[in-house]
Image (cartoon, grey):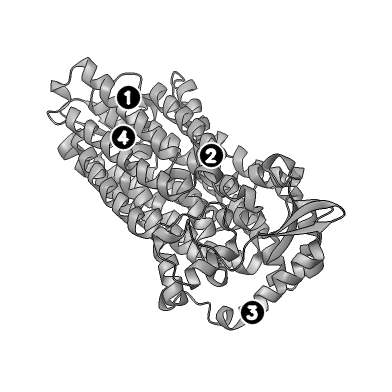
Amino acid sequence: MPHQATSSDSVWNQPWLIWMVVIFGSISSAGFGFDQAWWASIMSSSQFVENFGSLDPATNTRALTSYQQSLGTGLGYVGVIVGVVCGSPLNELLGRKNTLWIQSAIVAVGVIIESTCKTSYAQFIVGKLIVYLGGGIATSVIPAYQGECAPKSMRGLMSGTYNAFLMVGGLAAALIVYLCRHISGDWAWRMVVVAQIAIPAACWMSLPFLPESPHWLVSQGRLDEAAVTLRRLRGQSFPAEAEVVALQQYCQDQRERLASATWAACFTDPVNRRRTFICIGAQVFQQAQGISFVANYQAVFLQQIGFQEVLLMSVVVYVIGVTANFLAMASTDKLGRRGVLLCSAAMLGACMFVIGGLTTNGAANMSYAMQVAAVVMLMLWFFSFQVTWGPLVWVLTAEVPPSQVREKTVALSGLGAYVTGLVIVFVNPFTQADIGGRVALIYGALSIVAFVFAWFFVPEMKQRTLEQIDEMFQDEVPTRAFQSHVCRLPMETVVKEGQEEFVESV
């Protein structure tokens, strides 16, 4: 799918609409991050526990039981999994924008159910499940939408916005929880839930101004609309008609494969199977290294080791997360994927092993210095994760899937992530109750496995076009040879109106 772009095709020379897509095309993911963050913080809130906790006869105080924690967190992930499965056909049939409309409406319904409950924990977790259902749909649509709208020079930046907005939503939630901590009564937590409605509202206001994916428009035969959209995304001088013809020809060349683009085709075709394995594996190890534990149970963990100001620390965690994600967005297209994932897996494992070692003898035997050291290691782990595995896995999810089964591969990747997360959030409360901070040793061991996975299976795709990536997978280029491989589809230099331009692929 060749197109022409000037030699000044840099991040800062893009039309304003690209930046609208960067910001508002991913804003729906902030809702998932918001709900996940306030739930992690609110489990330590005395006002919330007073409403929904169980009375402990031994201490005569209320607390959420391990069962309630597991159910409240786990059923949310069930909603995400259902959303991922439902999101793929919606994404294919209705397009990216219409799917985002539906996703925002679902989140709004869930927020209303959550915020209107009084003492019914069942109603509360049903609302939470529906909010997470919307989060699962966002997981299906946003990586595909950003990857298809992005010029090559911005694919890493744009694909990383999904995770960045998870952190932005999480920071907003943690900050609101902290500011509301002294409110008496249930408005201390209810106000946090009500505030979440701002995210679907922002999505509704921005969607009329966002373009549909030009790839999806071409796949539906809406060629004139696709040309108009490409000029809006790339600039008025962009040869949109030629690009549309190339996109259409590419679709025709893939017709036989597209006709067999079933869910099974993600695994039965050897080339597709390799790409599907990379996408799912990366998502699985993103979760397995401990982000579900840190995102959902870090407040409980800090309480267990005797650390004070737990809610304030939740705010600090998400400030770190937002900062790390913006650093990742700025550096991903320069530093690449493979080497960063390898180095960070080693760092993440080391941090978790230190945390596990510090907490081995239990909270009662930890000095204040050890508590501080454990918290510092947790913050370092979170920063390292959010600058590497957090956003980079979504970059892989945007660029590795083959075009003929893109939506299905993205959906399977999200499914792999959230099934893994579901297992962790169901099991972690009981494991953490039994062994305390030593649970970190398990996640440290899984980081070692993640390192091995990245070494053998994740190739370097920095500054490669989607078509060059297709070519290398079709030619069965070994994983470690991707970076040096010379493709048959290189960038070509042409001369037009006295200035150099480049023929490249989106």
Secondary structure under tag 2 reads helix
Is 438 on the left-hand or right-hand side of 395?
A: left
Q: Mark 3 and mark 2: span between their CA atoms?
A: 35 Å
Secondary structure under tag 1 reads helix
Quadrant where the N terminus is found in the figure: bottom right
Q: Splitting the image into 4 quarters, where does residue 369 fall?
A: top left
Residue 402 in the image: above or below residue 288: below
Q: Of label 2 and label 4, which has the lower sequence position?
A: 4
In the rendered image, which residue does mark 3 sit on? 253
Q: Of label 3 and label 4, which has the lower sequence position?
A: 4
Q: Of label 1 and label 4, which has the lower sequence position?
A: 4
Q: Mark 3 and mark 1: span between their CA atoms?
A: 54 Å
Q: Nearer the viewer, residue 471 or 197?
A: 471
Residue 77 in the image: above or below residue 19: below
Q: For the residues labelled 3 and 4, say whether their Cβ atoms are less than 8 Å apart.
A: no
The crowd level at tag 3 (other Cα within 10 Å; few <14, some 14-19, many 20+) is few
Spot occupied by residue 242 in the image (x, y as percentages of width and height):
79, 67
Q: Nearer the viewer, residue 30 or 252?
A: 252
Q: Which mark is residue 53?
A: 4
Tell me, yes or no, if residue 111 can be seen here: no
In the rendered image, which residue does mark 1 sit on? 376
The crowd level at tag 4 (other Cα within 10 Å; few <14, some 14-19, many 20+) is many
Dot 4 amino acid type: Gly
Q: For the residues labelled 3 and 2, say whether their Cβ atoms are less than 8 Å apart.
A: no
